[in-house]
Amino acid sequence: MTEQEIERTSLRSRMVGGITSSDIGAELSLAGWVHRRRDLGGLLFVDLRDRSGLLQVSFGPDWTEATSLEGAHDLGPEDVIAVVGRVERRPEANPDLPTGEVEIRAVRMERLSAAKVPAIPVYRAPEEEPPSEELRLRHRVLDLRRPELQRHLTLRHQLILAARNYMDAQGFVEVETPILTKPTPEGARDYLVPSRVHNGEFYALPQSPQIYKQILMVAGFDRYFQIARCFRDEDLRADRQPEFTQIDVEASFVAPDDILRWMEGLMATLAAVAGVQAQLPFGRMTWAEAMDRYGSDRPDLRYGLPIQDWTAATTDVDFRILRAAVEAGGRVRGIRVPGGASLSRKQIEAVEAEAKSAGAPGLLWAKRTSEGTSGTIAKFLKDHHLSDVALREGDLVLMAAGADKVTSPALAATRSAVARVMGLPYETEHAWLWVTHFPVFEEAEGALVPGHHPFVMPHPDDAGLLDSDPVAARGLAYDLVYNGTEFGSGSVRIHDPELQRKVLRILGLTEEEIERKFGFLLEALAAGAPPHGGIALGVDRIVQRFVGAASLRDVVAFPKTTAARALFEGAPSPLGDAELAELGLRVVARDSSS
């Protein structure tokens, strides 16, 4: 079918966005919303909007039927109308519109639906402030009419379609996994669904299809993917939603390089759809190197400013804070900022505030100008110290001293803040990176927790560390990072049921807990499991970063607020006593002191 045949319906012959000067003289039937109206007395102009764009419609006594002309004067914003008319060249073209060379001279017009005065404007001039986000989410049906949101959601559709086609071409089969499933610990709280049939028992909404896709590998599907809906009951931020979509992938008989190669091809395909550069192959960096050089496992490599270890360079600096940090087993690390001496004390304090918000007690700094060296640590630095940290005229150094677990996030925040405050130009607009060899375990509040999840295969070279020093064990895990945002996370999985039991025991689970929570996975692995691995890529984040949106809520049709509320439909909402009784539930007041 041609594009015009696709656009045609019983009430219209074309959509407005593709009408150009090549259509001059054509008789068309159009339908859409009144974007805005300009009434000049004898003549009247309406910008007609549909999903494809805007087109000017002109009404005048010389070409419009009298009843239609009269009705046009009564049109309000967001009324739905149908128009029949001829395409003509506009007397004055509008270069800001793709359809700006032409207009429709309406012969007949019918108002199909009258709209009440919109609670928020769909059209606003560029200089006008938008309504608050809360108001836009409350009136989401109007907010979704905005062209930019429609462009974002259309691109989302195109990216998902391209992903499906790419995965199919690589031999992957899309398999749907359950939404009502078994509660399992994956790092966040589950959303629980009470069972009416099995009183007192609960389903969980999946945080991911992780266990199911592993079982599919054991079942022999070899290559699986799914555009999967996932749910996590956790505190929200601008880059988090309680329900989200991911491109979920798993394959058998693979090593990490296989997954990385397929996903680089997928991302290059998606980037091409969005007009984003993705030069292959992507860079690679181990987790240890990323944390050491950038303080983060998702470093933004669009600009430089690596973290440097100045412990040796400052051993004889007569400053108590540095000595105490090193004596306690920490390091002195920092960032040299070329040109940073131009920053004022107030700007440096703003950068320091970012470091403090990331957990550091503060920053030490020195800058060097033609007048000498100044800053909180400047008087303690001798000439050889300045040489060792390469503090040249015009530069600024920012230091943090202590354990890496404190200084790494602080210096990562410092790095981002300096780049923002100085307006540093990007060395590249599109920085793609694989971060590899994540730790299998992390320490949290005196206990071991999974670095990714409990199913990551330990690196073969570190298998012996599971008994002697599990925190030091690296895993065959990898994250995809784009411009400082994690797009996806994956690993090669444990396919040996006894090794899987061992990892679960290290995490502190009893044999009873292992059987209750993971018995069905272990049973599947014992049936003969191939080596397998995969990844999950966040669709919401990919679209958000590709379009440059400030929030995930700008690329999701019906998002939740940061309080996990759906303002448009009013969810969540309380249940009546009868509905609760049917589920065997009752609501008790939460102890506000807990």
Image: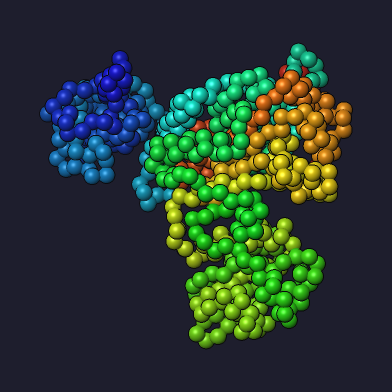
587 is higher (above) or lower (below) than 407? above
Tell me where residue 370 appears, x and y as whole percent. 50, 85
Q: Quadrant of the C terminus?
A: top right
Residue drawn at (65%, 59%) of the image: 292
Q: Quadrant of the N terminus?
A: top left
Residue drawn at (75%, 29%) of the image: 496
Residue drawn at (31%, 20%) of the image: 6
The image quadrant of residue 18 is top left
Q: Can residue 58 be seen at all in this image of the molecule?
A: no
**Left or right side of 88 for 407:** right
Depth order, front residue of 526/66: 526
**Left or right side of 167 for 526:** right
Tell me where residue 411 appears, x and y as whole percent. 63, 62
Q: Which residue is situated farthest in the top direction here?
A: 197
398 is higher (above) or lower (below) than 504? below
Coloring basis for residues: rainbow
Residue drawn at (82%, 29%) of the image: 514
494 is higher (above) or lower (below) than 372? above
Q: How many marks?
A: 0
Tell me where residue 481 appears, x and y as whole percent. 55, 46
The image quadrant of residue 92 is top left
103 is higher (above) or lower (below) than 438? above
Q: Can residue 279 be seen at all in this image of the molecule?
A: yes
Q: Which residue is situated farthest in the bottom direction here?
A: 371
